[in-house]
Image (tube, rainbow, N blue to C red):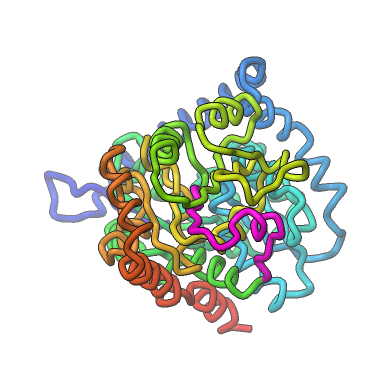
Amino acid sequence: MIYTVNRCKNTKSPSCSQCILRQNGIFTTMHFLYNLAIIILEKLLPASSLFSSKMRLFVNGRRDVFAQLEHSLLKDTPVIWFHAASLGEYEQGVPVMEAMQKHFPEHQLVITFFSPSGYEIKKANAFAKATTYLPLDTPSNARKFVDLVQPDMAFFIKYEFWPNYLSELARRGIRTYLLSGVFRTQQPFFKWYGKWMTKTLSAFEYFFLQDVSSSKILTTLGFDNQVVSGDTRFDRVSRQIEMDNTLDFLEEFTQNSLCVVCGSTWPEDDEIIVSFINNQKGDAKFIIAPHEIRADKIAPLKQRLKVNTVLYSERENTTLTDCNVLILDTIGILAKAYSYAHIAYVGGAMGGTGLHNILEPATFGVPIITGSHLDKFPEAIRLRQLAGLYAVNNQDEFDKILSKLLVDVKFRTQTGMIAGHFINSNTGATESVMEYLNRDS
């Protein structure tokens, strides 16, 4: 396994036996403490489910994983395993899943999720023979899971690093890859408490990385089995424009009006959006797709709007042409809704919840506005540098840039063209992955 040993002060040799023993002792101790913490967590989680619906899904969904796998998987049929933390990582994996089904049709796919927000939405996906939660990362769970699944290949997406699963895959010599990987100096590998985890990265046969920064950081950890292949999400969203994105109710709602689509919004996003709508002097129409679509969250949003507003669930009994705002209290249609946008606002970066997918509107050549918390989103930072995205800090900045985009046709068109070109010039990550996998076949 590849890891760095601190140089002994009393010798010039990096392989001093005393240093190695000391380092291995630290690694063993930290790994033991990690396992202990996970086991304790596994015991305590059922109690937490009493107070949180999300935790209830997290706990209950893991109770029958092994039985579900035994029931769903075909015997004597090889398996390719994809693991995603949540919905965004799943979307990154989709282009490779599609390619794997084409190039390895004799294999069945297993997809696992860590988060309920991914599993609950995609548990009925079109790719996998079995879709489950990933059992918590204990040594016994890792052994039992790999015993059942017996994958020929395993793909971990973006930055899912589970030491016991990786160690089990490595012990059995299973080909394992990191897909659209991201490395940052804030990760545990660079902290005193997480350095031991660096050893588990040796489980990866190859790292397919999103950016040069990740490549440089991974190199400092001692790994050169890597390539900057790019982000597979670009491949995913670039195909959306080729699909039929027609939605009859949006045809009726938008007519010939300018349309602003506000996707995956949180309360701090809604605050500035509602204020603009209530005070706007033009006749632009707004589609708002809140991140949380619970009725108790949607009702106050609708109530604050002083213009004619309709919910998606109410559309059958409403003349949509008379409405100024349409709230999507449903999931699964936002990507198509972006095709009706002249301008997009993408939520999550006005507060600390995390920016949502800017690539979906960008693929339609739509100028984008977001909040300003973009530090962990390199694609948003790059698009802002290219002037295809504008990040705002407050109501005043939001009002100014949105008003300019609504009024200035040339500015809006140029900004949208930059966004569209950004997508087209960054596709190809999936092809890079498949070239590597097919070179020995």
> Which residue is painted at 37% across and 70% down in the image?
413
Nearest the viewer among 297 and 232 is: 297
Quadrant where the image shows the N terminus? bottom left
Q: Total of numbered circles in the picture?
A: 0
The reply, left or right, for residue 399 in relation to residue 100 is left
Q: Quadrant of residue 121?
A: top right
Give percent across and percent down for residue 313. Answer: 72, 40
Q: Quadrant of residue 297?
A: top right
The magenta span reads 244-262
The reply, left or right, for residue 199 in relation to residue 136 is left
Q: Is residue 352 visible?
A: no
Give percent across and percent down for residue 366. Answer: 44, 64
Q: Is residue 192 visible?
A: yes
Position above or below: 133 against 51: below
> Which residue is painted at 72% across and 34% down in the image?
61
Nearest the viewer among 194 and 229 is: 229
Quadrant where the image shows the C terminus? bottom right
Give percent across and percent down for residue 256. Answer: 55, 63
Nearest the viewer among 279 and 122 is: 279
The question of residue 246 being in magenta is answered with yes
> Which residue is painted at 60% across and 31% down in the image?
298
> Which residue is painted at 52% across and 50% down in the image?
285
Position above or below: 294 against 203: above
Position above or below: 303 against 119: above
